[in-house]
Amino acid sequence: MGKIVSFGFLFFNLISISTASAHDGSGIAGGFLSGFMHPILGWDHVVAMIAVGLWGAFLGSTAIWILPVVFPMVMAFGGALGVAGVPIPAVETAIALSAIVLGGMVAFAMRPPLWIAAIIVGAFAIFHGHAHGTELPNSANPLAYSLGFVIATGLLHVGGVMFGLLVRWPWGKTVIRAGGGFIAIAGIGFLTGIV
Amino acid sequence: MIKIFGILLIGSLLLPRIAFAHSPIEGMDNFYNGVLHPALVPAHALLLIIFGFYVSQRGPTYVGSIGMFVLAVFPGLMVSWFNVFDNLEIALLVLSVIAGIATAANLTMPSYLLKMLASATGFLIGADSSQSVLVDAERLTFFLGCGLGVILLASFSWALGDYARNLSWAKISVRVVGSWITASALLVLVLTLFKTTT
């Protein structure tokens, strides 16, 4: 009797399955979600964004927020170029290089002046922005899409900053530098096509 | 038996079904729809949030600009009543970029400029809230709700920003949000302008 009830219940559930349409990719919610997932689903973007926050935290108190503020502003410029259809050569290569360079900066504990760090981060932001920007015209709601990918990018920076706060402890510095090394190696993997 | 039933119950809850997350909005009354309108239109929400943040970032001296903003909302809504403007998104995005850059860079602008920004923000958001499908009392109810919603959203962001002024990490967060809103608004502004010219 019990088995019959269970199978009856299961059968009822199976025939009542229908498509989930809460986030069907249209409208404000769909546009936001689509934009939000764009940087998160690309590992090359993810590691580079984390490296920005990590390097900012590693460089010190001012850089911890200057770099994550500079990045989205310059990324918007790169995105605008993508929207306008202005071609930038070797975008994917530059994105992979950003992981190598930014990860390498952390791994080798490089501490250039803040303005040089901002220029390095800003230069790579143009390529990341271009990659996101080319997707913008196809979005159901461009503003929601752009907000989604900017917030996702910012949250990845915050993740890197949080990780970078380990710098307060001597063992933390080693862990952070190892993390930078891992990011740089991942970048080599993206560049060579292994990953 | 109970375990199997429990597993089946959890499974049934996890199974996908049509989600009616936003369906109640269709059945809402016009006043409440008006209150939610600024929060549900991304261009309005972004501008109101960053405007509130910017005014709060400048400190109590500049709080008078909130008054200018409130006074400008209702003429904007009156303009919206007659459907004078078709689409003001570009103007709203330009204001978002200006306020976003000013917030991210922690720039102080002269008092008269801030009052102009406040007036333009209130007026343009009001003027961009037209509802051609509603008539007479329904439209009036919607506009009253919309006016309240616009003022509430700006007030909330101002209050949040004012609270953030006392916390060092929160002050930085406000500037980071400024850079995010600038980036989003700038991208869509370029997209809109590019579509218009091609």
Image (cartoon, helix red, strand yellow):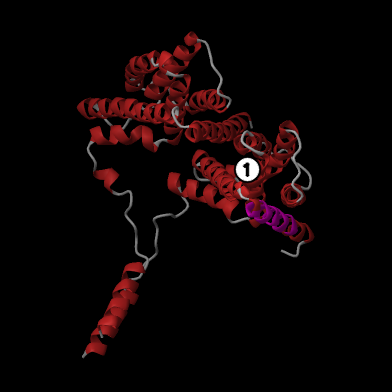
In the rendered view of the protein, which quadrant contains the C terminus of chain B? top right
* Residue at x-position 46% and y-position 12%: B116
Q: Which residue is mark 1?
A: A57
Side of B87 where B192 appears, left or right: right
The residue segment tinted magenta is A171-185
B187 or A65, nearer to the observer: A65
Residue A1 magenta-drawn? no
Confirm whether residue B87 shows in the render: no
Residue A120, relative to residue A166: is it above or below?
above
The residue sitting at 32% across, 72% down in the picture is: B10
Question: On the picture, is A134 further left or further right than B92?
Answer: right
Magenta stretch prevailing secondary structure: helix
**Residue at the spot x=39%, y=16% of the render?**
B63
Q: Is residue B178 above or below residue B76?
A: below
- Quadrant in which the N terminus of chain B appears: bottom left
Label 1: chain?
Answer: A
